[in-house]
Image (spheres, grey):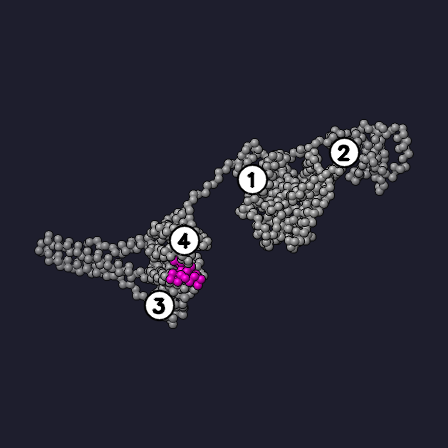
């Protein structure tokens, strides 16, 4: 029996191949995202290329593709059946010719029966299987649920909230189940009536149109036809600008979204672009910029439109160079052009740093904190300071405080102070670079460096807290901020300064930062007077500016409240100018105006005294600063001079303890019973007790005998109950306790003399500083003062 073809197997095989090719929509697309391609990132590529295949979620009957497939299958089966009948007849004819006439009749009879059976079998196979009749949709009367019209209405109402891929794809699948001619017309009508303000919804609606357009081509065709007619109408009404501005923006955004889904024909989109390029005037320039921003990148990098689009973009650039346009339109075209055709640049090269440099940066940027500052200092001291790379790296990091956390700037200043003991040259270089950066910032006044200038000013204030700089440097910086680049150092209202405009408040912010860091230190003596004088001039500087912004005004009020809570700010420039004039006149007629002229020798003495006083202030401030944190590891103290008596040695202390023990054994029994913790023994030669007056005559007699020349008298104070008992002891001067006491007396006397000298020198230095400041102020005003001797 001949082998009959199996139509069912071939049909299922064809169906499986078609499904595998269609369902994997990403197979026919670009596999990977290429930087610099027609998509900005991989997420955008997946949005416009990876579309949902409705055949995987919706039965074919709803998509209208079942009748077409059945017609194709029936035609293929008829062709196969006809070829099979012809082959069977040829075989029978050959067999009849070989067997003869006798067998012909039998064979014919058998053949007829076989043929009838085979024909009946073939006929049964060739007959197409009837499809089950479609059941009509239930009427509203029979089914209490909503009908198709209500379902379409509900679906269209949900589209306004479909602002992501999942929601819009689900809406497309739901609409496919409601597919009908009336439903498609209602969808197209909704798509053409989207609100003009919902431009964010257009790409998602375009994705829905692209998903449905594969099986419902009338939806994208009707939408494109509407947008094309609207485009032509808007171009004819190009003189109507304001009324149709939103409509033009909506139309171009819709066309751009459909273009990215490859729904618009190539000639249509290129024709629209050419219309704008040919006009190139008025509102067409704005439309051209929106067009390039919307789909210019896609058209330039697509294979089908790339060459022609590049030629038209070049034509646009030529017309732009030859056409006189306002600044707004020029900026629009430039931004649109570089958005769709960004300049090519290579990958960013990472800076190569050595392991040592990375370790230092890790210490300062990551590890440095209040709890770890001693550990960081110890590790920095262990570095190879003879290596130029280490020194250069540390200098860069310490002079760039804007790279450190703002809260750690004070810790950076503290590290600079701690390193001064071991590497003085390094600390001096850091201070010099900080002052140079502040000066350069005032000279250039570049907006992008404002954050750096704030951090640098903060570091300067913290350096003064740790006595790395003097108060004179701080006040010089403050006066420079309010007078630099102004004619004669006097800011005036309405006076335009190139690097300090009236609407530029950044110098005020810098003054507040510096005063907020170290202003609380200027509250006594001449420093307070200097700060008061500066604040008077600072108020004049503020009134030369335009009305302050809210943040600067709050910052200024906080600073003034912290420094001078009771200070009254002048309201007008005249009041501030009067206060400044009074200040200058008071300085001119101050106590230092009638002093004699100073020569170079006196200046040197003053500088020497200033340095000595600063050293003493540094030592005092070091103890205060060190009390806030644990001591530095491996601390070394370097003394500028060694005093004659620095206290008793270990041997002298041991001898003193022995002598004290012996004298305690000679005490009375009552003194031994006293608690050791409560007993207080005073070894002083100047203690006067109640019995001293009674024994005055005995003391005078012993003095007359010359007994005081070789001995030293001590008074032992003990307690018996609530009564104090004194006992006078006479110790030879050669005894260790007498030698120790004498040395202590001399040491106390020396310290008192030193303290007295420091106090006197400090008062003298304050007067000279005030006198020198008055002279400098007068010299800045152009007044030369000469003192003549009488």
Q: From the viewer's perspective, is the residue at label 2 or at label 4 nearer?
A: 4
* Magenta-drawn segment: 234-256
Q: Nearer the viewer, residue 113 or 217?
A: 217
Residue marked by disc 4: 323
The earlier-in-sequence mark between 2 and 1 is: 1
The vertical placement of 113 against 651, above or below, is below
The earlier-in-sequence mark between 2 and 4 is: 4
Helix, strand or loop for the magenta stretch, by majority: helix
Give the class, few, some or many, for how many residues have Cα within 10 Å of label 1's Cα (few <14, many ≥20).
some
Q: Cα distance, mark 2 to mark 4?
A: 91 Å
Give the class, few, some or many, for how many residues have Cα within 10 Å of label 3's Cα (few <14, many ≥20).
few
Residue marked by disc 3: 137
User: Which residue is depicted at the point 35% across and 65% down?
Assistant: 180
Q: Nearer the viewer, residue 87 or 223?
A: 223
Q: Quadrant of the N terminus?
A: bottom left
Residue 424 sits in quarter: top right
């Amino acid at each position: 029996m001949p082998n009959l073809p199996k139509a069912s197997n071939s049909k299922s095989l064809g169906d499986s191949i078609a499904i595998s090719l269609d369902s994997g929509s990403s197979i026919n697309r670009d596999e990977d995202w290429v930087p610099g391609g027609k998509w900005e990132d991989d997420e955008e590529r997946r949005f416009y290329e990876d579309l949902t295949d409705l055949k995987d979620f919706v039965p074919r009957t709803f998509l209208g593709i079942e009748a077409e497939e059945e017609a194709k299958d029936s035609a293929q089966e008829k062709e196969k059946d006809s070829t099979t009948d012809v082959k069977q007849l040829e075989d029978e004819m050959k067999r009849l010719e070989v067997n003869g006439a006798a067998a012909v009749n039998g064979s014919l009879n058998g053949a007829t029966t076989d043929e009838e059976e085979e024909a009946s079998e073939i006929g049964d196979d060739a007959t197409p299987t009837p499809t089950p009749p479609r059941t009509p949709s239930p009427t509203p009367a029979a089914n209490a649920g909503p009908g198709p019209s209500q379902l379409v209405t509900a679906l269209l109402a949900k589209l306004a909230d479909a602002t992501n891929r999942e929601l819009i794809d689900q809406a497309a699948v739901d609409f496919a189940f409601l597919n009908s001619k009336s439903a498609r017309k209602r969808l197209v009508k909704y798509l053409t009536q989207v609100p003009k303000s919902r431009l964010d919804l257009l790409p998602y609606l375009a994705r829905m149109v692209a998903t449905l357009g594969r099986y419902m081509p009338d939806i994208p065709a009707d939408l494109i036809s509407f947008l094309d007619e609207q485009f032509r109408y808007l171009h004819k009404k190009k003189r109507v600008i304001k009324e149709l501005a939103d409509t033009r923006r909506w139309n171009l955004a819709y066309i751009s979204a459909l273009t990215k889904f490859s729904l618009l024909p190539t000639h249509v989109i290129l024709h629209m672009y050419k219309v704008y390029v040919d006009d190139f005037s008025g509102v067409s320039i704005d439309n051209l910029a929106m067009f390039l921003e919307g789909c210019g990148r896609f058209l330039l990098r697509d294979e089908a439109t790339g060459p022609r689009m590049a030629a038209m973009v070049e034509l646009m650039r030529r017309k732009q160079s030859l056409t006189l346009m306002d600044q707004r339109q020029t900026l629009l075209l430039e931004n649109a052009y570089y958005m769709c055709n960004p300049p090519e640049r290579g990958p960013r090269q990472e800076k190569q740093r050595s392991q040592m440099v990375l370790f230092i940066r890790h210490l300062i940027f990551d590890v440095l904190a209040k709890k770890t500052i001693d550990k960081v200092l110890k590790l920095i001291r262990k570095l190879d300071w003879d290596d130029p790379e280490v020194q250069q790296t540390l200098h860069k990091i310490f002079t760039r405080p804007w790279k450190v956390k703002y809260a750690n700037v004070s810790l950076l200043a503290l590290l600079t102070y701690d390193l001064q003991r071991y590497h003085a040259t390094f600390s001096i270089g850091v201070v010099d670079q900080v002052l140079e950066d502040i000066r350069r910032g005032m000279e250039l006044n570049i907006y992008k460096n404002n954050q750096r200038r704030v951090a640098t000013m903060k570091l300067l204030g913290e350096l003064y807290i740790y006595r790395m700089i003097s108060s004179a440097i701080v006040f010089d910086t403050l006066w420079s901020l309010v007078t630099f680049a102004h004619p004669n150092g006097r800011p005036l209202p309405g006076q335009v300064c190139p690097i300090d405009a009236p609407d530029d408040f950044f110098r005020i912010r810098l003054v507040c930062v510096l005063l907020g860091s170290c202003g609380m230190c200027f509250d006594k003596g001449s420093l307070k007077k200097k700060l008061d004088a500066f604040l008077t001039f600072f108020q004049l500087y503020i009134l030369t500016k335009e009305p302050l912004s809210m943040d600067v005004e709050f910052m200024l009020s906080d600073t003034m409240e912290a420094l001078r809570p009771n200070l009254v700010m002048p309201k007008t420039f005249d009041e501030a100018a009067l206060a400044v004039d009074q200040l200058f006149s008071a300085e001119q007629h101050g106590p230092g105006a009638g002093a004699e002229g100073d020569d170079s020798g006196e200046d040197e003495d003053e500088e020497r005294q200033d340095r000595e006083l600063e050293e003493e202030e540094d030592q005092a401030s070091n103890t205060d600063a060190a009390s806030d944190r644990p001591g530095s590891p491996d601390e070394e103290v370097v003394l500028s001079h060694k005093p004659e008596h620095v206290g008793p040695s270990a041997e002298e202390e041991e001898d003193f303890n022995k002598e004290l023990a012996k004298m305690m054994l000679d005490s009375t029994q009552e003194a031994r019973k006293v608690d050791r913790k409560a007993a207080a023994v005073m070894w002083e030669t100047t203690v006067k007790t109640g019995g001293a007056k009674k024994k005055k005559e005995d003391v005078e007699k012993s003095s007359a005998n010359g007994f005081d020349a070789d001995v030293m008298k001590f008074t032992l104070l003990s307690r018996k109950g609530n009564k104090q008992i004194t006992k006078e002891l006479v110790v030879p001067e050669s005894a260790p306790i007498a030698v120790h006491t004498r040395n202590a007396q001399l040491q106390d006397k020396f310290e008192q003399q030193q303290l007295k000298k420091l106090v006197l020198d400090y008062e003298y230095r304050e007067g000279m500083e005030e006198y020198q400041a008055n002279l400098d102020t007068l010299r800045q005003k152009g007044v030369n003062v000469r003192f003549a001797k009488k």
